[in-house]
Structures are given as C-alpha cells and as structure tokens.
Image: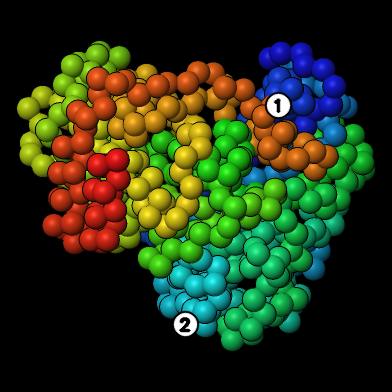
Amino acid sequence: MTAGGGDAWLGIDLGTQGVRVVVAASDGSLLGEGSCPLTSHREGDRHEQHPEQWWRAVRTAIGRARTAGADLRRVQGVAVDATSGTITMLDRRGLSVTPALMYDDGRATAETDQVNDAGEQQWAKAGYQRMQRSWALPKLRWLLDHYPHAAENGWRLAHQNDIINGKLVGHAVPTDTSNALKTGADAAQVTWPEAVLAALEIPRAMLPDLVLPGTVIGQVCAAAAAETGLAEGTAVVAGMTDGCAAQLGSGATAVGSWNSVMGTTLVLKGVTKDLVRDPHGVVYSHRSPSGHWLPGGASSVGAGLVAREFADADLDRLTREAAALLPTDLLRYPLVSPGERFPFVAPDARAFGSREPATRAESFAALLQGAAYVERLCFDYVDLLGAPTDGAIVLTGGATRNPLWNQLRADVLRRPVTLPRNAQPALGMAVLAASSRAPLDSVAAAMVRPDRTLEPCRSEKHRHEEGYLRLLDLLVQRGWLPGVVATHARERTAL
C-alpha cells in the first residue's frame, strides 16, 4: 500500500463469492484493502444467498482494510456495487424475509413470459427488447406469486446493495438505476414503468425510489459508524452493478472507450453518447453517472475453461509451447457453459472445435485464439449497432495474467490495448464515490493508473484473418450467427 495524501474514498464490491473493499486516495494510491467470503446455495436453476451475511461480511472486510493501514477518518464518501439482478424482500422493520435470489437464478421462466408480454413496448424503448429469466423483474413476480401476502404485510423489494446502503444510512434508501435496470427501471427518465407494473400487479409502493448512480443518498449514521469505524456523516453515494463498477475501475469512462473483461467469461462494456438499441436483444445499456450510456454484453466464452481443462498443467510451459503454434488452424468456440448470449443469442450453442487437437498445447493455443476471435466478433457486433469503437480498449480480468494472451488479443483486434495497474470493481466504486464531487472522467483519469500498453504486432496483422473468417462461416453454418452480423464482420476484416 502507498501513503497517498488528501481525501480518501471507500469502494465496496459485493461479489458472488465474497465482499471486497478498497480505500483509495484521490490520486489513486491504495491505502488499504480487505475481503471476506460469502456462501451460496445452488440447486438446479436456483441460486440463493442469505442476505444477513452481507452486512457482517462488509464490516469484516472494512475492518481488514483498516488493519492493512487504511485511515478511515480520511474517507469522504463510500459507494457499493452488487451483482446485477440480485433481489430480496424486506419487512416493515427493514429485515430480510426471503432468501436473496441471485443474479443467475433462473427459476422465473413462466414469469419472464408474463413480463415480456406486459412490457414489450417498454423494453424495446429501453433498447434491450426482452427481459431474461435471470433478470430481477421476473424474479420479483415469482416472489409475489409465492408470498401472496407480501403487499398487505408491507414488504418491499431491495436490491443487494440497497441492503448495505440502508445499513450505512440507518433507514430505507433510494436505489440506483444501474442495479434497478433489470427490475424494469427506465434509466433515461429515472422512473419506474408504472403501467407495466400495474399490468403485472406489482404495487409501486413496493419499489424504492430511483436516483442516478453517483447521487449522494445519505450519510453514515451513528450505529454504522460504531460498527465499521467510518466517521459519522460520511457521504453514502448511490452505486452501480458489479459489471459497471469493473468498467469504472478500468478507467474506461470516455465516449468510444471499452473495457473487455476476460474472466471466467467475457464481458464487454463501452461508453456511448446516445442509447444503443439492439433489435436482437443481445446488448443492453446502463446509464453512466456522467449522463452517457454504458452498452455491453456478456458472453459464455472465457477463461473458465482454462481452470477446467488445464488445472493440473504447468501453464507457463504450456503458454511457451502454445506461442509457437499460433495462429493454429484448429478453431475452437470455447464456451464455458451451454448457451450463448453475446455476440449472438443461441440457447442451444455448445462448445466445439473444428477438429481434434494433436497435442494438449495445441488445444490450449486454440482456446486462447478462439476467445480472442469471439472478443473481436463482439466488437464487430457493437460496431454494427452504431456504437463508437475508436477509443481506448482496456483489458481486465484474470486472463490478463497471461502475457501471451494479452498480446494475442491486441493482434487479433488489430488495436492497442491498455492494462491498468489496480483495476477491480471495488476501486470503481471508490472512483464513483469521488465523482460525487468532481466530473467522472477527470476522477477516473486521476485514480486509475495504466500499467502498460501493448501494440499489435505488425507482422501479425493478417495472420489471423483467415482463421477469423473461417470461424464466422462455422457459426453461420450452425445457425447461431445471423447473416447480417457475419457480413458486417467480414466487411470490417477488409478495412
């Protein structure tokens, strides 16, 4: 940790497997970090957590950041992100009365059809066409079906970070339009679609008020100050989803810039001046604290297969062997799990290879290459939608630990890529907390420090074109990739 002078900002990241907090100075210096694990229960398509553990974990993580050297008296503001679409219900006392239905809980299949029938025009207006069964509004309808007395008992909906914000402030708080997007919030108007809610028999009184991310929604109360060590009166700032937090933590906040996160799966998020509307419902957009839009999509392709297929391998040695094989004519579409969501929607999609690998190193090389080709196709897709893609590209996620993969992605994209020094969602929330006092872009520029930039190798410029075009053909043949998308990608290849 580095000292850093002046004000400090606290970012809290509520992930699936744990809570992570960062205390950062206004110049980006990290003053202290802490974490605490969370537990989940999965059964079939259901995924639940007990909300009571969230506040305990936050307190523990903040305490560990203080032990690591953070002076919490310097903290001027705190912001909290959470997993997108995770909800629970609170009673009149503010206590959770249902388990939390997590971001990927898929139980609300029938309710999703009801939501899409009732809100068809609203969802098209919002740019994403249809809700998915893991989104919060179908899950809310499911909760009301299974807890029929919720409304008369005064129960109300809470998103995951609403729980923590309420504990910090000491009373119910407004929710941010980012976490409320999958509950149906109209981010452009900062309103709930009351006609749709009425058609679904969801009482408006059950939903919190709405504010834009970055809005000060209260101050740390005396009870929370005593439990956390934060100063009473510290500003509490409306947060965002964990994906948006990661984007802020990457520093990709200017129009035309993109953050590509290659973790277990691939997530691509950018910045546009205007709302991007996707007729295929692949891309949806959050509202930036700056007033811009944050379009993005999440693929089921990613580095998760590395851990699954090569858990017992010497990855350094495998990487050296793979480097000599690239580009390989073995084409892989490396899905981590069945079904694809971005850059196309194909629920029946399955991972495939164009042939059997000759060696384990060739299979590894094809995995890295295939993920890079999918990443390029994602950029081609958002370009087709009219989103600007000429700004900086920032790479984050676990895959950035592999230098060969980083360079390969730059070569395949034919663009420079930047790797930041301390990118993480918790830092993004520290950036958001600081943006309550200054413009987001200037705050991000001061707090997010680039580590290095990789230029595409000129000698590699055309070596991946044939393989990329062959992959497009294979995807079209399987009926997964729409012809108009493939045509646009081929046209861009010629540029």
- Give the mark count: 2
| Residue 334 in sight | no
Residue nearest the viewer, comparing 18 with 495: 495
Q: Quadrant of the C terminus?
A: top left
Q: Position of residue 349 (x, y in %)?
A: 24, 56
Residue beneath the point at 31% across and 35% down:
372
x and y, in percent, of residue 427 in the image = 65, 32
State the residue at coordinates (67%, 59%). Answer: 177
- Amino acid marked by disc 2: Asp
* Residue at left offset 41%, top offset 67%: 279
Q: Is residue 95 left or right of residue 39?
A: right
Residue 31 sits in which quadrant? Answer: top right
Q: Quadrant of the N terminus?
A: top right
* Quadrant position of residue 285: bottom right
Q: Which sits earlier in the primary sequence, circle 1 or circle 2?
A: 2
Q: Nearer the viewer, residue 472 or 101?
A: 472
Quarter of the view holding residue 370? top left
Residue drawn where x is 36% and y is 52% of the image:
381
- Label 2 residue SS: helix
Q: Position of residue 225 (x, y in %)?
A: 87, 38
Q: Nearer the viewer, residue 334 or 165?
A: 334
Instruction: Indicate the secondary structure of the residue bearing disc 1.
Output: helix
Answer yes or no: is residue 188 visible. yes
Above or below, comparing residue 81 to residue 415 in the picture: below
Above or below residue 489? Residue 320 is above
Callout in the foreground (1, 2): 1
Residue at label 2?
117
Residue annotated with mark 1: 446
